[in-house]
């Protein structure tokens, strides 16, 4: 049925690779071009000269260190707290029976679909009432809530695939329940925990809209906000912006390539096995 | 064993932190959104910390505003276009990947992951740069093909403007769509396909009776998620148009944002947001039911 690769598929594949990859290629090549090559009305597809001036300009631009620091703080707390909270919840959902479980699962799935832009207004009003606007803590709180449904749901998927018999065997052999979790369940869940925490990392690192609404002062800016600051009323500094974009994307690309298999199958696996 | 634990407080203790976070950040705002939409809530109400109940005023104001209907229609067209293009192209790419030489498939997979990993603000910045006014590579390529259009501003014309914004959104969404469908395609059991072939089924029959039923749930999820994501696109439009989009670029999300954070009419903004959510629920109702079924397993 599926014989060797077809000519048509290969040609289309090459075209798809070029079209999909071009923006990334253009970002990276632009970031290494000297200013004279960037501000040319006749840009060339292949870079002729190489320069790091965009990177030095981006890194020395006001607020870079602060934004990097803020993003790291936000990411760290979002990941750590949401992983703990989600781990507890997923154990309950995957391993225990309790009244209201179906409602809990259903509400997690529904909440996951809420359009963020529609919730901006009440969220903003709520956090300003709690005095959490323009504070990194407020952003962390919202990020935790927004990654939780996916993380719980995905961890549940990983947990369900671990046979209960292993835990039961541990219990029979005289382990206490916490011991069973620590010695049997968590090691087996490690890949799932890594994958979902990287997912939370990426979400918190990339998020723009909530940070844009909630954080107003410059010294609270996260990396995406800092990126948006390259455009002001005098125009956009394209070269340094491309260098900054490359730097911002780099950690995500590295982490993403590590976990993408697990996430892609995690999202759809349940549906296929339905 | 399970029965014995039924009355245990453990499950509730374990889910309570997540309930707290979700309740505070997601459920309470929903409730607040609903009550706000029936209130006049402007600057003076913010200071007082309390809105004035105005009944259905916000909704009648919105529905009698001709601009609202234009914006709703525009949003639906924009969403429909992006979902259609990204799902069709994604499905097509996924099927191509099955028949590609392994080297090409791996390269394409790598490129897709690279694109998938791009932070939203990064991809918007790059696309803005590709279509910038003075030094656009796209303009240069078009010119090199023999057309004359130096210093073209793509955003004067809303059609080309939305085309570019939609292109950027679809570009960002394609990796998830393609890789998910490809993953599902590779899970179609080979034995079934072989059995069908032995039984003399042609490729269309194979697709209709074996591949399609297996892929259907994946398509439902992907289409519904795409609708939800594309309907609420905000940052793309906002950043592409320098944080001050003109009225022709208003979509529902921008409209609600402007009403509330621009004009400080939070009640009106809430009403529009609520209409957004209800529209989405209507469109994706099927997906919701499907997910509920999965959850109750």
Image: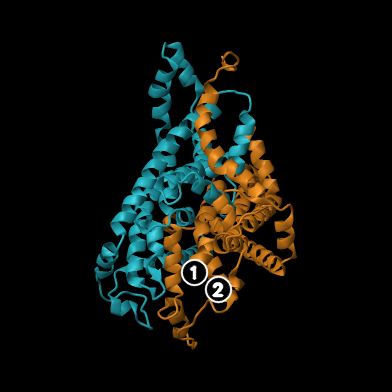
Chain colours: A cyan, B orange
User: Please, is residue A30 above or below residue A193 in the view?
Assistant: below
Q: Position of residue B279 (x, y in %)?
A: 69, 54
Q: Tell me: B13 left or right of B290.
A: left
Q: Tell me: B81 left or right of B170.
A: right
- The quadrant the C terminus of chain A occupies is top right
* Residue for point 66% across, 38% down: B292
Q: Tell me the crowding category of disc 2: few under 14, some 14 to 19, or many 20 or more residues within 10 angstroms, Cα based.
A: some
Foreground: disc 1 or disc 2: 1
Q: Position of residue A135 (x, y in %)?
A: 41, 48
User: Please, is residue A268 above or below residue B39 in the view?
Assistant: above
Q: Where does label 2 land, which residue?
A: B161
* Residue for point 72% across, 69% down: B66
- Contact between labelled residues 2 and 1, with CB atoms less than 8 Å apart: yes
Q: Tell me: B174 left or right of A246.
A: right
User: Please, is residue A148 above or below residue A238 in the view?
Assistant: above
* Residue for point 40% across, 33% down: A190
Identify the mark at residue A169; answer none if there is no mark: none
Name the residue nearer the viewer: B81 or B264.
B264
Name the residue nearer the viewer: B74 or A96.
B74
Question: What kind of element bears circle 2?
Answer: helix
Q: Tell me the crowding category of disc 1: few under 14, some 14 to 19, or many 20 or more residues within 10 angstroms, Cα based.
A: many
- Pointer 1 indicates a residue of which chain? B
* Residue for point 68% across, 44% down: B199
Q: Position of residue A79 (x, y in %)?
A: 41, 41
- Pointer 2 indicates a residue of which chain? B
Q: Tell me: B95 left or right of B77.
A: left
* Same chain, labels 1 and 2: yes
Question: What kind of element bears circle 1?
Answer: helix
Q: Where does label 1 land, which residue?
A: B240
Nearest to N terminus: mark 1 or mark 2: 2
Q: CA distance from mark 1 to mark 2?
A: 9 Å
């Amino acid at each position: 049925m599926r014989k060797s690769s077809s000519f048509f598929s290969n040609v289309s594949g090459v075209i798809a690779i070029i079209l999909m990859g071009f923006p990334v290629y253009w970002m990276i090549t632009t970031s290494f071009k000297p200013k004279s090559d960037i501000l040319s009305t006749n840009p060339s597809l292949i870079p002729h000269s190489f320069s790091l001036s965009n990177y030095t300009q981006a890194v020395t631009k006001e607020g870079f260190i602060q934004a990097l620091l803020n993003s790291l703080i936000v990411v760290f707390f979002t990941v750590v707290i949401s992983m703990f909270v989600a781990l507890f919840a997923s154990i309950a959902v995957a391993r225990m029976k309790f009244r209201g479980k179906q409602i809990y699962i259903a509400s997690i799935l529904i909440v996951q679909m809420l359009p963020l832009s529609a919730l901006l207004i009440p969220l903003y009003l709520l956090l300003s009432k709690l005095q959490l606007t323009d504070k990194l803590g407020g952003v962390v709180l919202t990020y935790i809530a927004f990654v939780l449904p996916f993380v719980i749901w995905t961890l549940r998927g990983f947990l369900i695939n671990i046979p209960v018999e292993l835990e039961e065997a541990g219990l029979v052999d005289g382990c206490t329940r916490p011991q069973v979790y620590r010695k049997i369940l968590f090691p087996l869940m490690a890949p799932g925990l890594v994958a979902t925490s990287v997912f939370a990392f990426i979400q918190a690192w990339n998020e723009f809209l909530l940070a844009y609404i909630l954080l107003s002062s410059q010294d609270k800016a996260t990396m995406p906000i800092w990126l948006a600051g390259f455009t002001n009323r005098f125009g956009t500094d394209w070269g340094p912006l491309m260098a900054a974009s490359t730097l911002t994307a780099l950690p995500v690309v590295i982490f993403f390539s590590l976990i993408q298999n697990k996430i892609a199958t995690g999202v759809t696996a349940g549906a296929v096995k339905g | 064993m399970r029965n014995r634990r039924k009355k245990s407080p453990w499950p509730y203790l374990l889910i309570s932190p997540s309930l707290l976070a979700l309740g505070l950040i997601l459920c309470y705002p929903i409730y607040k959104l609903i009550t706000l939409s029936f209130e006049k809530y402007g600057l003076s109400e913010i200071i007082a910390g309390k809105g004035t109940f105005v009944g259905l005023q916000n909704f009648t104001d919105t529905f009698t505003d001709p601009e609202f209907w234009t914006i709703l229609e525009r949003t639906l067209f924009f969403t429909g276009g992006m979902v259609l293009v990204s799902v069709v192209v994604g499905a097509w790419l996924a099927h191509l990947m099955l028949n590609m030489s392994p080297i090409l498939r791996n390269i394409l997979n790598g490129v897709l992951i690279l694109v998938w990993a791009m932070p939203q603000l990064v991809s918007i910045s790059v696309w803005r740069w590709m279509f910038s006014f003075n030094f656009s590579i796209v303009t240069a390529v078009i010119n090199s093909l023999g057309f004359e259009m130096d210093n073209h501003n793509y955003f004067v014309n809303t059609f080309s403007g939305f085309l570019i914004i939609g292109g950027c959104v679809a570009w960002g969404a394609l990796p998830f769509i393609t890789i998910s469908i490809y993953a599902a395609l590779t899970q179609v059991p080979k034995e079934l396909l072989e059995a069908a072939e032995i039984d003399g089924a042609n490729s269309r029959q194979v697709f209709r009776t074996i591949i399609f039923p297996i892929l259907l749930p994946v398509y439902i999820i992907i289409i519904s998620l795409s609708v939800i994501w594309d309907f609420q696109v905000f940052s793309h439009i906002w950043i592409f148009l320098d944080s001050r989009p003109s009225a022709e670029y208003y979509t529902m999300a921008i409209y609600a944002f402007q009403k509330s954070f621009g004009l400080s009419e939070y009640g009106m903004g809430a009403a529009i947001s609520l209409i957004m959510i209800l529209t989405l629920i209507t469109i994706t109702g099927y997906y919701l039911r499907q997910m509920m079924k999965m959850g109750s397993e």
